[in-house]
Each structure stands twice: as C-alpha cells, then as structure tokens.
Image (cartoon, rainbow, N blue to C red):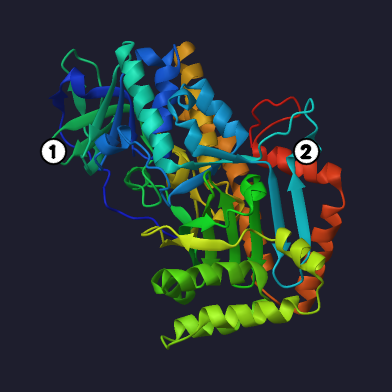
Amino acid sequence: MLRSFQRSCFPGKRNFATSISRDLAYDVVIIGGGVAGVTLACALASSPAVSRQRIALVEAMDLTGVKSWEPKQDNYSNRVVSLTPGTMNFFSKIGVKSHMLLDRTHGYRDMRVWDGVTGAKIHLDSALLNTNGQQQTIAYMVENVNVQSAALKRIEECRAQGVHIDIFQKTKVAEINRESEVSQDGIDLKDWPTIHLDDGKKLKARLLIGADGINSPVRDFAGIESLGWDYDAQGVVATLKLDPERPESSLTAWQRFLPTGPIAMLPLAEGYASMVWSTYPGIAQALKTIPASDFCTMVNAAFRMSHVDLSYLYKQITQGKSHDIQGEYEWRESIAKKPLSDNEILKREHSLPPQVIDVQQHSRASFPFRLRNAERYVADRVALVGDAAHATHPLAGQGLNQGILDVECLSTLVEKGTMEGQDIGNIHLLRQYASERYLRNIMMISSCDKLHRLYSTDVAPVTWIRSLGLNAVNQMDFLKAEIMKYAMGIEYNGDIRRM
C-alpha cells in the first residue's frame, strides 16, 4: 500500500505587503546544486531566449571544490552514474560535455545479465544495432563530480557571455512561503514564492524549481505529497581493481540477479570497475566492515557461486565470528571446476567478470533503496525535477537519466513559454511538463519495481517462468536491439528519444 511522506517544514503563510529589491527577484530560482540542478541551470543559461532571464541557483554545500575538481590517477569516486547516449547528447547540446574530462568517461558496448538461481541469461551487444558499421556505446560510466564540475564551469562560461545567473552556495533554505510584496519598481510579486535563506536574504521566484532531493523542501512548500515505500535493502557501492589479465572485459558490464538482490560490475578505465550490490541491510553492514581481502572474495563469490553457497558465506560474515572466507571460496571453486577440462575452465572463467583483486580504500559505502513518486510534479509557480519528483530502484541504472529527461523537458518548455511571451510560472504552462513526464516516469518506476520483486525469490515456479522468458528474449536479436535502443535513449536514426 502507498504511504504518504508529506512533510510540513515550511508552512505556506502570507504576510503583509513589503518591498523587495529587484536584485533579489528572479525569473527562475533552482533549489539544489546536484547534477539535476546544475544541468538545469546550464540548459536555461544556454538557451538564447531564456538566457536573458534572471536565474538563481541555491545550494547548501560548498561548490568551490567541485568546480575545481581534478581527478587523481588510480583513484575513483564511489559516486558513479551510468549515462545513456541520449543524456550525453543533451549534455553536448547545452555545453556541459565540452567541459567534462572525457578520459574519466568510460563507455561500455556489451552487457551480460543472468539469473543467479537458474543460470538463465541475456546478452545485450550493441553490435546488434548495426548502425553504419560502427558499434555504439550502451552507456557511459561517469563520476558524479565530473558532471557537476563541468556544469559549474559551463555556468561560469555563460556568465562571462552576459547571462545573469547567481549562485548562492553554502546557503541553506530556512523557509519558503508567499508574502505580499512589490518590487522597488512597483511590480506586483504577491503570488511569487519567497525563499528565505539562512543568511537573511529573501529571494522571489517567478518560477521555483525543486531539484533538492528526496526530502524536498520545495515539494513540501507546494503541499505535494510523495508516495511510495522503502525497500528492505541497501546498495553497497565500491571501486574495484580487476585482474589485469582480462583487459577485453573493459567494455562489458555484468549483472547477476540473486535472491537477496542484484549485483552489478560496471567498467571504469585503467582496470577499475564500479560495483553496486543490492542486498539485505545486515549483509550490507557486514560487507562494509569485513577486511578488504574478504570483501574481494565475497564479490568474486557473488558472481560465481550458487545462491545456496552464498547463503552460507552470508552467515559467516554476519555472525561476527572468525571465519576463513578465502578458504571456503577456494574449496567451493575447486569442487565446481573438478569435472571440467582445462578448456572448459577457461571458457567458464571468460563467461564471468574478471576476478576482483583489490578494493579502493575508503570506497565502500551503502545507501537505502526507496521508491517514491510525487502525486504531481507542478503547482502554481513550482516544478519538481529529479529525486524531488521521483526515485526508483537502481537495478536498471536509469534513475539519473530519468532526472535529466525531466531537466530537458522542463527547460524546453520554459524556452518555449519565454519565446511566446507566456508567464513561465503559470500553472497552465507547467502542466505541459507534468503531462509529458509523469506517465513516463511511472512506467520506469513500475518496471524496476516489478523486476526487483520478480528476481527476489527462489521459489521454483517463479524461477522457472522468469528463466523461460529470459532465455526466450535472448534468442530474439531484434527484440534485444529494441530494448537497447530504449535504454540508450535513442531512436532508429540516433536522435534523442523521449523516454
């Protein structure tokens, strides 16, 4: 059953009329300087029509270090996202891609997914798309900070070209309400939201955009409920060092569905990979605290051993007793390889991800999985994008891409409204954004949730049916090509697809 998660941090009260400086009245105020917020600011600033408007970006954190970020060799952030070609095309259009460090942007062209109970599998190879003889990239692995840094540099570039965009960083939103005010030149701002910052400043917004995450103050101010639930699962992330004898795997992503949740290994450059392992909270906590060598063994086991053997290892690491994880793993692997010839052993190994030989120090972390969707995405002079509007299970790697599609849709609508002389904060204009994005996001959220539930069991009838379906799809190249096109955000001609 859906549960309401509406909060009441910012009551929508009205005060007596006062006067506000025109310098603090903006056409667009964006709350949140994460990826969705900064790319939305770039999209607006890059539009010739909208660039003449006054734009403000408010972020509680210090963005100085993000803007000046320089990567360290052999050291990757554990906050990594999978960006579709459609998203990268949009970043190119708004000038963000030209500021990204592309040597830290690693694409993969091949994806192997299989059932951890039955072994049923599907192999997605972008060679099936057959686009002018060139193999396309399914997705790009990028550190979040790479995108944020590039967007902030693009904003500075737009400011140098005369775009009026102010960044209020290290500044929290203290309150949002509506106050009956007029600007110093007599413009009536009574229905414009007032954003009270903790440094005493008050901003007025013709259009207030919430890109402020799952606990969005902007959504609370608008009186919009967020519906959904928390999964009994957490995602363990880490940066892995892989066996250098398997360089051919640098273009392949791997995902295995286990009864406790899927584990995915996504390639980075220089022989590294990003891992996301969905599992129960108790196991997640143990995976973060066990020695690095045991952690690497557990990851290797998760891609190789039966779910029954894995259950035994889970008990070993969660009971807090001394254990020999490496010994248990090697013994079970020797049993699995015993009836195989040398060629069969080699073939088996190359059908699996490279062995993990190390984990980057301090890269292990976990986060809870949640499903959320706002009951509506807009109110009068308010719009929500990204996690403020919706959150989904990350098993398909589409969460941020859906948020960027929100950004693209809303920025296009604001540009259209500006060119037509419309009030960009008017609810009638904003409803076009909601009608475009709401159903599409619901479809993605629902699909990911159903996949999670389908594979979170080892009950025989269910495993038989899902394996039958997975193996059947794997035999149909045309269907796999259509799945890839949809996931990549492209149409047949390579244009951006509105997912």
Mark 1 vs mark 2, foreground winner is 2
Q: Element at badge 1? A: loop
Q: Amino acid at mark 1?
A: Asp
Residue 186 point in image, percent of width and height: 19, 14
Q: Residues within 10 Å of mark 2 (few under 14, many from 20)?
A: some
Farthest residue toward the bottom? 321
Residue 92 point in image, percent of width and height: 52, 24
Marks 1 & 2, CB-CB < 8 Å contact:
no
Q: Quadrant of the N terminus?
A: bottom right
Q: Amino acid at mark 2?
A: Ala
- Residue 284 to residue 364: above or below: below
Q: Element at badge 2? A: helix
Q: Which residue is mark 2?
A: 127
- Residue 165 to residue 234: above or below: above
- Residue 199 - label: 1
> Foreground residue, 482 or 356?
356
Whichever of labels 1 and 2 marks the residue nearer the N terminus, that label is 2
Separation of disc 1 and disc 2 at Cα?
55 Å
Left or right of residue 41: residue 269: right
- Residue 449 to residue 206: above or below: below
> Foreground residue, 177 or 293?
293
Left or right of residue 312: residue 18: left
Residue 176 point in image, percent of width and height: 25, 41
Q: Quadrant of the C terminus?
A: top right
